[in-house]
Amino acid sequence: MMSAGASRLAPVAPAVCAHCGLAVPVRLVREGEPLQFCCSGCEQVYALVREWGFDHYYRLVDRQRGTIAPARVTGRSFEDFDDPHVQAEATIQVGSDRCRTRLYLEGVHCAACVWLVERLPAVLPGVDEVRLNIGSAVADVTWRPGRTRLSAVARALDRLGYTPHVHRASRAQEARRVEDRTALARLGVATACAMNLMFLNGALYAGEYSGMAAPYVALFRWLSFAVAIPVLLYSARPFFQTALAGLRARIVHIDLPIALALAVAFVASAWNTVLGSGPLWFDSLGMLVAALLGARQVQRSAQRIALERADSLRGVAFLEFARRLQGDAAAVEVPLAALAPGDRVEVRSGELVPVDGVVLSGRSSLDNAVLTGEAIPLAVQEGDAVNAGATNLGARLVVRVDAVGENTRVGALLAMVQEALSRKPAFLRTTDLLARRFVKVLLLFAVATGLAWLHRGPAVAIERVVALLVVACPCALGLSVPLAVSVALMRAARSGVFIKNPDALERLRKVDTVLLDKTGTLTEGRPTVARWHGEDAVLRLARALEAESAHVVARAFQRSYGHALRLVRSVEQVVETPGQGIAGCLDGHDVRIGNKAHVEATGAAVPDDLGRLARTLVDEGLSPVFVAIDGRVAGIAGIGDALRADARSTVAALRTLGIRVRILSGDHPSIVARVGAELGLPADDALGGLTPEAKRDVVSGLVAGAGSAGAVVMVGDGVNDAAALALADVGIAVHEGTGATIVAADVVLTREGIAPLLDILDGARRLRGVIVRNVGFSLIYNTGASALALAGLVGPLVGAVLMPVSSLTVVLSSVLTRTFVHRVSRGAARPLTAEAEA
Amino acid sequence: METVFVLLPLALLIATIAVGLFIWAARTGQFDDLDTPAVRILFDDETPRRPIQASASAACAEAPGAVPTASQLAKTSVGTTRRVPE
């Protein structure tokens, strides 16, 4: 049925990719073809989606407003997924013959993905069900080990453009989920009981005014006693547990006065129920527990978003597999644990080196930035030592395994991170500091009340003291902080800042020093065209030619200037000379790009001014690349790791806030000094040549030295920063940082650049304001209520009215304040609402 | 008015059942993912064209990369779903 469409589907301008909808590079446009693709990944995915009959996917995608990134198909065999030890980390047995495995999928972007992924059982025999969580991009796959292999499922997902990873954090996540579910059940019970208590006690209050026969009063009192029991024994258990644990550790926690009030209210009311006279506090008790648990639940769910996202990012383990070579056979993908020293592994272009070892054959360049902070790739050849975690930028290498896993350099660094995390001191929260004073004052008030009413007999005195302890319960205080924090967490998450540890916000209220890593944090971490000298027409030809290559320099051009779409009409005779450059004929012009020898090979000479420019570029730490058009050298590009666009303004803004900014880098001191100078930092604040251990020690020294002067904030992206991140008062991992930094950091950025740093500081300051205001409100309420109780004016009804009023003030004050400026996050896998077609 | 002696405990009993159901729902993880079900409900109930079972299983058994090219595919089906950026 297709052939008829040839005329209708004649080349459209501009050509769009049939899979992802992005523009198709000119050289890939196939004249006369109805379907165009921007890359081979998209083409493969499109073919598979059609083959499996899942065309409906594109109709769903069309309804989404989001954009799809070009599909990435790794082509891995995923044989390592069949290893029982690898599976065990994320698999549970369901019934006798089925397993459920949790996989994290890269590339999940919208509701259509949920549809596509969940259709897999239709085409994969042995797969019973797939459920994808769109928020965390985690899929639960139910499959039959007897009928299929996990690697087959993984291959299918990979070929659809979703790179699967065994979800390593699923144990911790499951444990947290169980906790969350229990907390939700407790909240549900407390809320249901609190409402029923309110009805029952409402009847009693009404009865006091209009008169109620004794049997009815007794019924209502006993029923409210019965309804209050599950509140105290089930829902309120966490308060008692924390208060007791605090007491054992000699810490006064905010839960202590709360638990005290609950216990006193319950015992006194139960006693009065049995006696058949005296005030009942059951309704206040129920409301208190429900409100406090509610606020904590809100904070939990806000925190869960950040934690699960961090888990997912961490699910992409830093090193997952190796391609082992045995004899002359093709490489087999095995888990790292299966390797032994002496084995040979293959490292393909673009992959991470999985082990520490020695190159047996091949020549390439390695990017060590995440390990050492060095921005310039290192050339390696036969006999050179390589480290696990380096990225192979060039050709295929064969490496002899010397050390695997924990025994590698990167393994030692990761162990150091764990050790540093365990050393991080506990943080004393504002509420806990207040709680200590609060308890003291409360006890003083209680004694005063008891003494003041002793002249009316012990029964009256006890009743007054009970009233005081109940109404003085710091409910508003307990509500205010979790609510304000959760509002801040949610707003922050929406603006691309995931706060794993909410204490970080409190620590950030006063910042003394901000320490910045250089490579990948202040800079892009990847080579880009940092300088260009030449005419626009020359640049256009250069971009068009570099679009044809996958070389480091070509990628720098592609990264800096984006897709080379329709720059020229024809590209012919493209020749790449390794180690020299690239040449081609574009629109009839002879274009050569490369080093001096390469452009001069056809007789062109580099003019003096460009030669001088080249030398200044080298002095700046950039590699000069010449562009010759028709035998004339007409342009020069400086390729290097350029500063991020927002680096200068962010550093300047931090300094105007009175914060000391320092650079901690593993790169050569001269390069670091130059970056420091460019940012306007004093020479001794730009430290280079630091090992990961040295970074850690600088941070711990500063943390110990700064003390009360303010927090020490560390910002980084590499494994070499991770230990420093863990030890800093607040560690911040930048966008696309390695898994180790996500584990170690308190805050994870999912927005590019370091400008979010300013948002975080601003948000923390505003949050501080909200907390101070809320604490003020609640203290005023507590003092007022205590004074009334001391005067003997407080009964259960007054308590039941005062408590919600004070709580409501705090809730409104927390929710209505803008703690984080809302910004649209980029590239995050946020759910987009699928819109029904109008 | 005496009926409250029966009705109130009865009402509380019903409330207990409701709370029990809520606890069951919470404990079986039905509140774990609040985003995806909202999206899933919008999918139409159309079953995709089922491919022949043999070809599907062959597709996942064989080495990756052996997918037919788009041009081959295009000969058998029309690109009705091509997207045009807005």
Image (cartoon, coloured by chain):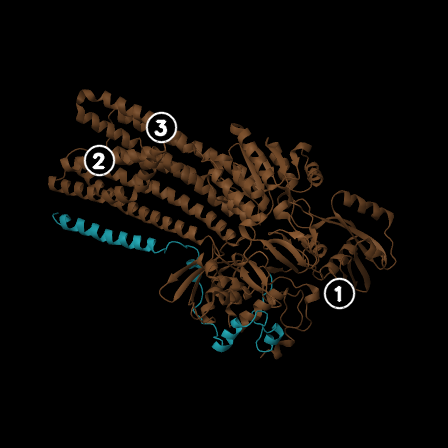
Chain colours: A brown, B cyan
Q: Chain of mark 3?
A: A
Q: Amino acid at mark 3?
A: Phe
Q: Chain of mark 1?
A: A
Using the numbered discs, state the Cα–Cα distance from disc 2 to disc 3 in whole angstroms. Answer: 22 Å
> Which label is found at residue A438?
3
Q: Helix or strand or loop: what does disc 3 sit on?
A: helix
Using the numbered discs, state the Cα–Cα distance from disc 1 to disc 2 in whole angstroms. Answer: 87 Å
Q: Residue at x 80, y 45 (%)?
A: A615
Q: Residue at x 47, y 56 (%)?
A: A167
* Crowding at mark 1 (Cα within 10 Å: few <14, some 14-19, many 20+): few
Which tag, 3 or 1, sits closer to the chain's start? 3
Q: Residue at x 21, y 25 (%)?
A: A461
Q: Chain of mark 2?
A: A
Residue A828 image point, x, y percent: 53, 52
Mark in front: 1 vs 2: 2
Mark in front: 3 vs 1: 3
Which tag, 1 or 2, sits closer to the chain's start? 2
Residue A350 in view in this figure: no
The residue that disc 1 covers is A569
The residue that disc 2 covers is A267
- Are both tags, 2 and 3, on one chain? yes
Toward the viewer: A763 or A52?
A52
